[in-house]
Each structure stands twice: as structure tokens, then as C-alpha cells.
Image: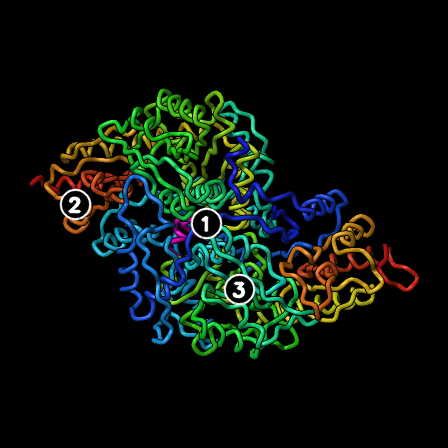
Amino acid sequence: MILSSPFTASVAHHYEMPLSLRSFTSLNRALLSSSSPSSLLLRRSSLVPTMAASTTTTVSSTDAAPQLNQSTPSPPPVQVAKRLEKFKTTIFTQMSSLAIKHNAINLGQGFPNFDGPDFVKDAAIEAIKAGKNQYARGYGVPDLNSAIASRFQKDTGLIVDPEKEVTVTSGCTEAIAATILGLVNPGDEVVLFAPFYDSYEAVLSMAGANIKCITLRPPDFAVPLEELKSVVSANTKAIMINTPHNPTGKMFTREELEFIAQLCKENDVLVFTDEVYDKLSFEMDHISMASLPGMFNRTVTLNSLGKTFSLTGWKIGWAVAPPHLTWGVRQAHSFLTFATSTPMQFAAATALQTSDSYYEELKRDYLAKKAILVEGLEAVGFVVYPSSGTYFVVVDHTPFGFENDVAFCEHLIEEVGVVAIPTSVFYLNPEEGKNLVRFTFCKDEATLRGAVERMKHKLRKR
Amino acid sequence: MEGKVSRASRKLEASPIQELSQLAQTCRAINLAEGFPDFPAPPHLKAAALSAITGDFNQYRHVQGICHLLATQMKGRHGIAVNALSDFVICCGQSEAFAASIFAIVDPGDEVLLFDPAYETYESCILLAGGIPVYVPLSPPDWSFKKDELMKYFTSRTKALVLNSPHNPTGKVFTRDELETICEACKIMECFAITDEVYEYITYDRELHISLASLPGMQERTIITSSLSKTFSVTGWRIGWACAPANIASAIRNIHVKITDSAPAPFQEAALTALQSPPDYYCSLRTEYEARRDYVVQILSVLGFQVRFKPKGSVFIFAELPDHCELSDIEFVKKLIEKAGVAAVPGCGFFHTTPQPQDGEKYQRRYIRFAFCKSGETLSAARQKMEQCVNEDGQLSF
């Protein structure tokens, strides 16, 4: 079934979805009969097996035989789906609220406090005025698909078909969701590198994937090749890569990518690669997995407008993949959001056609910002790990004597007036991240200097 | 590599509908298929969007003001009291609001009731979440259902019922009586209702849209979804919402954050202006659409279509093929595109059930959906083109 404009209905044909999983409905009802909503959620979490490196969240061996109890009148039902275990209120929201309360300088949230370039905003304005306000073609406005294909060719040397190999989504977040939901079956094994952007784990669990997690460790967060090799097999469906990497700023090297590529070819594994920070690569050139020999046919490359053009709220992202993989991405996308914001797509096409000088200036600006932050953090006493790309830096906070990253971040907000993000949220096993926190430098220079000053004056080693 | 595609997508074939779509483009047909306007968005909205972009509202955001305005509207129009701080999730269109709601409450194996005919996307979301769609047929010609029949479709596995009213594709507006039946059933079976109310402001003949959540005992179990798109002719802006009791809204929000994280920022800002439109705006919207409905009903009747059910809401008319016509809906639409240069949607794609004996076997291949969210010029041009293809009785014939 393809939902293509202008026909939004299709001939009904019933396709098979794997329904080999048990129903939890009656379990829900049993839990419902005598509990308040919040205690229900607490009780539910005790039924989920504790997270291990490899896990599936859609089948639980701890389900008891349920008792249907309808005689007790129940309070408003809180029959949320089991998959919600992985979908909790994010740390970002919590930290942001605390930040506002204490008037803290926010170096936690990953979006700029400066705006995008006028020429892109003007293009959006023109598009709105010109009446481009109705549904765009589901998989993208043709101009944008072409611009994405051209940019991709410039960056990787690969020629792709904008009609068959490019899909536009509401931000890279949706591209990730569509890729995973469109291509991963319940029970499929997917390899993930920790720390990871928080939507990866959540959506993989939504798809019923069996996650195999490999931890990247300081100081250089290099890929542990032998460990990776031991985990990848013919049963592996996909490996997820994020390069340049959030939160560490690591960039996957050619050697690492070639090693991964080799494993993928030997075991017939897909790669999903999130490259939203590709234009913020400072210490080395960004390499796209898709450009390695034999890899295009098994790779989905994900990207977006937001980070490169400081317009994170526009929600324009995309997936580039060979037709047989694009199909799955488009199916899921059509059910998730159906179409992407039309005027912004036209503006994005304009943005992507800009000359290389834009990207050079972007890098220069960010390098200057990075210098301010990194020098400041080092002077204050953090152990600062080298970040090759993105606008993030991770540091070891333990010189300041706090038992974990959350405690440190709370102190940083409350007593120093600066926000950082505790990185433990980016790991399957939070213990692994407790020594690290993430700072961002996508802020104007005055803000960065202000934050550094506060830390110099108020942050003391214990 | 073929083995790497998911099981679900492997089963899908290219749709005959897609062929018709391509044919329509090749023939440059007048498009009465797509459910979005070809007239401009309201000027006051566009101005608000421009001002938001220039005013630097371009980073991730959640515009709380939208929730307050919506809460006020719900109280005023439907008497539903909601908490603006906790009960709303702003999403990329009603599409995303619906998907997030399904993912928030449907577990693998859960059954979800839908009325048939139905907008295709509902089923896809349910299946993606591992749920089982169960269809309750609406019987032609007036698309009604029997009260005592409804309960038969519920089982202990029923998690939710989806209600789209005003209804796509039939234009039906569920009556208070029908809503009460649905309400009772949901309460007895302790299940959710998810509503799709995108056409809530487009009703005719003084018919009022009643929100299911306004019925006694329903608010606590209803997720309302809607959007700006149809009310404000901005289907391309992707601003929609889900409204539900706080703990459910929280679940929906958590899913939404992982699917898209944020609806487009400048359009959220513009939504503030949209949602403060004066009563006049809504009156004109309805009046203008009613005029279009009447026009299209008349043309189609004259051309021989059987319009036994005049739409009470939405921007669609679900017309039955002329009695004498022996073509199926798909065949008819193909001819309509090729010979008359007008595109519409064959109704079969909206049906999912086996016809009931009393309704006759073939009706599911006899309906065509026409959209009338088009300018007067477009509708008039469509009429002229179709008039070229009539037989001696003045009826459309190929």
C-alpha cells in the first residue's frame, strides 16, 4: 500500500503483521481493578525484566496468569501500552524546568539560542505567501528531494534517485522512527552503541527489537572492534551508527567504518546511520558509511536541516536509502505523520543549494565557540574529552566529588547556575555514564563566556 | 538483500490507486480526489506565520498558549473541562496525534474497533502497533449501524474504539443517539475511545458536531485528536493535537517526543492566531462549504449519480454510481479520468468488511468519493468537463 497524493485511499489488502506476541490486555485489566493511575505505572515497571545488554520489551516472561476482574468499579483506566516503559519524560524537560527555576544558563539543551540565516527564512516566507500551504507529496516536495540528492552526491560521491531513494520526514527524529518501524521486525537483533541519542532505544523497543548494546568508553570512545565482532552474527538485522556522535563528539574513523562494513557484508546486516551533525565536523572529515564499497545497498543515511541551519524547530529531516529499504521507511512515515511541513520544505531546498562558503563559516563560528567552552571547562577543572564533531563536549565531573552525574548536574544548576546534561540517560545501563556530563556550545559567545565565568567562580573541587 | 525488508512491507503490492493517481497526473485531470483545498489559506494566518519566522520562533518549542485556547474552545463548545497544562500534546498534524495515541495505548494483540468504511491510515497505525483492527460495518445508504449489533464486536481484548466524526469518506455526522450507544458500549467494556475530529467545524444543515468526550463518563476514557488543517485550510502546516486525561496525555507525549519531538515551531505560533479567529470566520467557513456541497450534490445528481445520503459534514461526498452503470468503482474512475478529465477516489479502498447479506454484495464497489474543498472555478470546470461525457439521458456514461 502506498499512500501517494492525491489518492489517500488504497485498495484494501490485508497484509500479515507478525502477531506472535502475547496479549497484555487481560493483564492490564487485572492491574486496573484496584489501583490508582500512578501506582499502576509503578507496579507495571516492576513486571518488566531489568535491562540487560540484550533485551526485548514486548514479551515478558514474568506475566502471571491474569484474572479478569470486572466486579470492582475501576477508576479512570490507565491502560497504557507496555512499550511506554521506554518512553518516560525526558531528562531534558526535567533539567530545563530546574534551570528556569534557578535562572541557570542552559548549556544542556541541544539547540541554538541564535536563529537561522535570513536567506532560508525568507524562502519559507515566500513559500507561505505563494500559497504552498497544503499537503506536500508524502515522501517530499520534488525540489527538496532533488536538493537532498545533489547535496548527498557532493558529500559522498554517490548518485541517488530523488524519487526512489530520498524520503522527507518531520525532522531526523521521525526519519529514525520511520526507519526502525519500517524495517525492523519484532525480535530482530539490532546493535546500538552507547551512549546514544535517547530516541534510538525507545523506538527500537517500540519495534520489538532485541537490542545488543556496545559501550564506547573514554578517553577516545573508540569502537571496541573485537567486542563488536563477537556480537554481530547472521542473526543481526541492523547496526545503528551516529557520526558525528551525540553526546561524545566522537567521529567514526575510516578504519572503524570499514570494520563495521566488513561485518555487515559477511553477515548481511543493514546499517542505519544518523549523520545530522555531518557539517559540524572539526577534527577530521566526516565519512558516510553509504559511500564505502558495497555499503550503499544496505545503508539508510539519516540527516536533517535543523542543526546545520540553526532551525531546529522546522522539523525537516530525510532518509537516503536504496529503493527496497526506502519502501519500508516510506510505509512507516506515511502512518506516522503522512506528510511534512510544506513551506519549510521549499525553504530547505533553497538552504541545501547554498554554496560551500556557508558551511565553512558555520564551522569557523562553531570552532570559536568550542574554544571558549573547552578552555573554560579545562580551566575550571573538568577532565575534558576531545570532541571531533557535533556541538557537544563530554567531560568527567568526578574531580568535583559528586557520586553521580545527576547529583552533579543538580548542584551545577542550583549552586552554580549552569545546566549540563547527565549522560547516564544515554546508556542502557546508567551506571556506565555516571562519571560524565554533556555540555553544548551551540549558544552565542556571550552566553558561553557567562557560563564559564559562573563555573570559575562557583564550582569548587571537593 | 530482499530478505532484509520487513515482513509487513513485503506483503504489500503496488496499489491500483497509485496507477489512477499517475493517470490523473498524465491526463492533467481536475482533482476532486485529494482532500485538501486548492484555494488559499486565510490571510490572517499566513501573516501570523510570516511574523513568527521573522520573529525568530524557529527552534524546538511547545507553545503552551495553544493548549489554553483549545481548552477554552472545548469548554465553550462542548462543555468539556480539560487541564491546559497537562491534557494536551501538540503534534505534527492529527496524523501524528493519532499514531502517538495508538502507540500509547495499543499492545500487541489488542483489538481496536473501527467503523467501516474508514480512512485507511487508522488500520495501518493499529497494525504497526501490533493491534488487531475490527470493523463495524455502517450500512448504506445512510451509513447507520444497529444499536444491538454494536456490542457484538466488542470482546475482552477490545482496547479502544476509533470514531471519526464528521466522517471521511461518507460525510456522516454521528447523531447523539449513536454516540450514546457508543458511549454505553465503551463504558461497559471499559475501553478507550479515540476520536478524529478534524472536520469538527465543517458541518451542514445546522447539524452540530458533538464531541464524544462530552457524553457522561466518556471524558476519562477518550482521546480527542484534531488539527488546524481542515478548519484553516493549512493542511501542509502539520499542526494537530491529542487531548486526553493527564496520565494518558503524558503517555502520548512521551511517544510523540520520540517520533518527532516537536511540531513545526513557527506554525505553532501561527496557531495562536488561528485559534483566536472570530466567530465570523467559522460561520463563513461553514456557509462557503455548504454552498460547495450543495453545488456538487446537484451536479452529481444531474449526472446520474445516486446521492442517497447528502453529507452532513466533512468535505466529501460519497456518491453511488448510476444504476445502469456496470463498471466497478475503479473502472469508472479510470474512465472518468481518461474521458472526462476529472479525478475522484474509488470507494473500495475504504471498505474492509465482508458485506452483510441485507446490504447486498456489491455496494462496496459502487461508491466514488468526491472532494469539494475546491474553489468555485475548479468545481465549475469539473462540471463542464463531466457534462461532455453524458449520454442521451444526460447521465454520465462511458
Give the amino acid type for the residue marked by disc 1 in the picture: Ser
Q: CA distance from mark 1 to mark 2?
A: 44 Å
Residue tagged 2: A408
Residue tagged 3: B113
Give the amino acid type for the residue marked by disc 3 in the picture: Leu
Q: CA distance from mark 3 to mark 2?
A: 49 Å
Residue A6 rendering spot, x and y as whole percentages: 65, 50
Residue B381 rendering spot, x and y as whole percentages: 78, 56
Main SS of the magenta part reads helix
Left or right of A303? Residue A411 is: left
Q: Is residue A63 above or below residue B77?
A: above
Query: Which is in the foreground here, disc 1 or disc 2?
Result: 1
Left or right of A447? Residue B13 is: right
Please determine if labels 3 and 2 lie on a single subunit: no
Among all residues in the image, which is located at the extreme left?
A: A462
- The boundaries of the magenta stretch are B253-265
Q: What chain is tagged by disc 2?
A: A
The residue closer to the viewer here, B341 or A351, is B341
Give the amino acid type for the residue marked by disc 2 in the picture: Phe
Please determine if labels 1 and 2 lie on a single subunit: yes
Q: Secondary structure at mark 2?
A: helix
Residue tagged 1: A20
How many C-alpha atoms fall within 10 Å of the one at disc 3: few (<14), some, or many (≥20)?
A: many
